[in-house]
Image: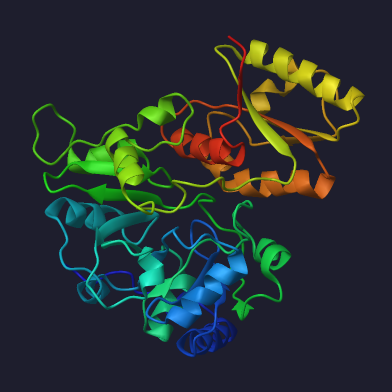
Amino acid sequence: MDDGGAADSGALRASDLEKIEEAAALLRSGETVAFPTETVYGLGADARNTAAVEAVFAAKGRPSDNPLIVHIARRSDLEGLVTEVHPVALALIDAFWPGPLTLVLPVRPGVLSPLVTAGLDTVGVRMPDHPVALALLRAADCPVAAPSANRSGRPSPTLAAHVLEDLAGYIGGVLDGGAAGVGLESTVVQVQPDGTVLVLRPGGITAEQLAAVTGTAAGASGGNVPVPPGAAAGGTGVSAAAAQAAEVSPAPRAPGMKYTHYAPRGALSIVRGSSAQCVAETAAGLLQAAQRGGAVTGLLLFEEHRALYPADPAACVVSLGPLASPEEAARFLYAALRRFDEAGATYILAEACPVTGLGAAIMNRLMKAAGDTVIDTD
């Protein structure tokens, strides 16, 4: 396979390259560095260095049974990390690397710190589609384990300021690369021996995009992409087979499968129903009751529904943009959740969205942030 992912160093200024080299030196010396990717900011450490990886877990307050994703800059780097790559996985790499797709692959024994894999026999690997990230990985010349650069359970950071808000004083440094483009973490998939693709975590690459590469025709070998049944109900978006594997396994196969994540400090619930009018009426009534009880309220809605609510239905109202533009909702979701923290909101309601395309990932994150608390209007 071709070696891809070369950073466009010509697009980076000399000052950027200097900062990248400083950050790379920190990684090589066992320090932690937050850096931008196209999804969210990651908190990186040399994946081979257990002390450095321990520092990542300590800074985040992350449970040690939650595996980390390893970031690489060259496809050839896979050879030293994993024992095999299924042909279907190769097809996905050809289609989506660099990009927001993580592949869970059989790890080569003894290469990575066992903390990275949480003791499993697999490792999640991806190649980010960001010039700063790729330049950093090339300069560091080591596999970099990097979960999102936030305190565990908090909304993931899409700006350097979000990283500093959560981790200032706990990490070695931050590379500022501006706002993340996708806004949601990578899609995590695992290719089974028969070529079936399990979506362990929905993300920036949709199930529809995966299916377009692998094929979904009945009887096609190695082409089925199971649509996560939990997503259709607003659940966690893990396929049945993956969920069963997670229950048997001592640790989840991918980040985001087991714990509450992405949560604002206030109590968040999702309001769901067959009509936007019913959702708005229910949410407005609950917000008014909460306000009478002394709560500072927040409402996360989609722009075309704003007119369905009374004026100023909550102390803090945040729009994710139109339902027809889920890319916008994905890009601003975590920043929106942090807005409620800035407003001191203690009671927050969020509208559900359809689970097609990126909607599956948006609902996955909202459900995790709400601890699966849903208010049905039907």
Q: How is the image coloured?
A: rainbow
228 in relation to 44, above or below: above
- Confirm whether residue 35 shows in the render: no
Residue located at (51% from left, 77% from top): 12
- Residue 265 in the image: x percent, y percent? 73, 46
Does 127 sit left or right of 29 as displayed? left
255 in relation to 345, above or below: below
Residue located at (19% from left, 35% from top): 224
Q: Nearer the viewer, residue 278 or 311?
A: 278
- Confirm whether residue 138 shows in the render: yes
Q: Report the label total.
A: 0
- Residue 318 in the image: x percent, y percent? 73, 37
Does 80 sit left or right of 146 as displayed? left
- Residue 208 in the image: x percent, y percent? 32, 35
53 in relation to 30, above or below: above
Q: Nearer the viewer, residue 78 or 177?
A: 78
Residue located at (53% from left, 61% from top): 148
- Residue 319 in the image: x percent, y percent? 69, 35
* The N terminus lies in quadrant: bottom left
* The C terminus lies in quadrant: top right
Does 141 sit left or right of 279 as displayed? left
Does 132 sit left or right of 224 as displayed? right
Residue located at (9% from left, 34% from top): 220
Q: Nearer the viewer, residue 29 or 65?
A: 65
